Amino acid sequence: MKTPAETRRLLDRLEAQHPDADTELDYRTPFELLVATMLSAQSTDQRVNLVTPALFARYPDARALAGATTAELEVRIHSTGFFRAKSKALVGMAQALMARHGGEVPADMQALTALPGVGRKTANVVLGHALGVPGLPVDRHVLRVSNRLGIAEGDDPEIVEQQLCAALKTSRWTRTSDTLILHGRRICKPRPLCEQCAVVDACDYYQTLQRERDRPSRPIRAARNIRSPRR
């Protein structure tokens, strides 16, 4: 795994390649970002952005959403997928916000992850983008890209988060996540576009691919004559 200094230099170059890195979810308030992030699970930000304008017009705050029925919510968020589970989680989250925090989104990891349907990744998104609290969300793109680049190791999101955070100042956490996510969407896909990558020369995954390609193939031995069995 790369040293913290190597990680920072590599991320400097990636950030230069993706100066527009930011969350792609549309929101105006911490509550809206919390809802949108919960909806984005197993969906796309673009799909969520098609749903949320009407959703937020109908349920502009935690009080309104807490009074919704899961049945009516399912109709409104159906296209984001897993709509039954999401509807239940959203109503439960809003009711918990009202009961525990007066309808306000808490700027605290422990309080956020205690809400129904809110995991560490969602909490980090809201903290970092809407509440001004450093957070480094780790999704499938961050896992894939960070492991390929050699700036983190493992498939446990929390461990990868800890490794990345340890190498960076807190002021870079959210920006780093945004950059790795965008790089994973645009270039370092499951089938990566390595020729378009600004840090291909420092990528562990690419170097491994090159070594495998350069490895001489073993000569194929001529098949020995095999006698036919006597009849």
Image (cartoon, rainbow, N blue to C red):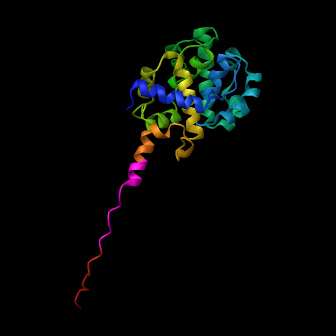
Q: Is residue 133 left or right of residue 67?
A: left
Give the total number of marks visible in the rendering. 0
Position in image of residue 133 (x %, y %): 55, 14
On screen, 173 above or below 108? below
Q: Position of residue 98 (x, y in %)?
A: 63, 12
Q: Position of residue 5 (x, y in %)?
A: 42, 24
Q: Residue at x 66, y 29 (%)?
A: 24
- Quarter of the image with the C terminus is bottom left
- The answer to whether residue 11 is above or below residue 28 is below
Furthest toward the bottom, the residue is 231
Report whether residue 152 is seen.
Answer: yes
- Observer-nearest residue: 125 or 102? 125
Choose top left, top right, bottom left or bottom right for residue 67.
top right
The answer to whether 88 is drawn above or below residue 189 in the figure is above
Write the residue at 63% across / 18% down.
Answer: 94
Q: Is residue 175 magenta?
A: no
The residue stretch that appears in magenta: 209-221
**From the viewer's perspective, is residue 182 above or below residue 196?**
above
Rendering quarter of residue 14: top right
What residue is drawn where x is 70% and y is 16%?
Answer: 61
213 part of magenta stretch? yes
Q: Position of residue 74 (x, y in %)?
A: 68, 32
Locate the N terminus and report the quarter of the image it occupies. top left
Farthest top residue in view: 102
Q: Is residue 223 left or right of residue 157?
A: left
134 left or right, relative to 27: left
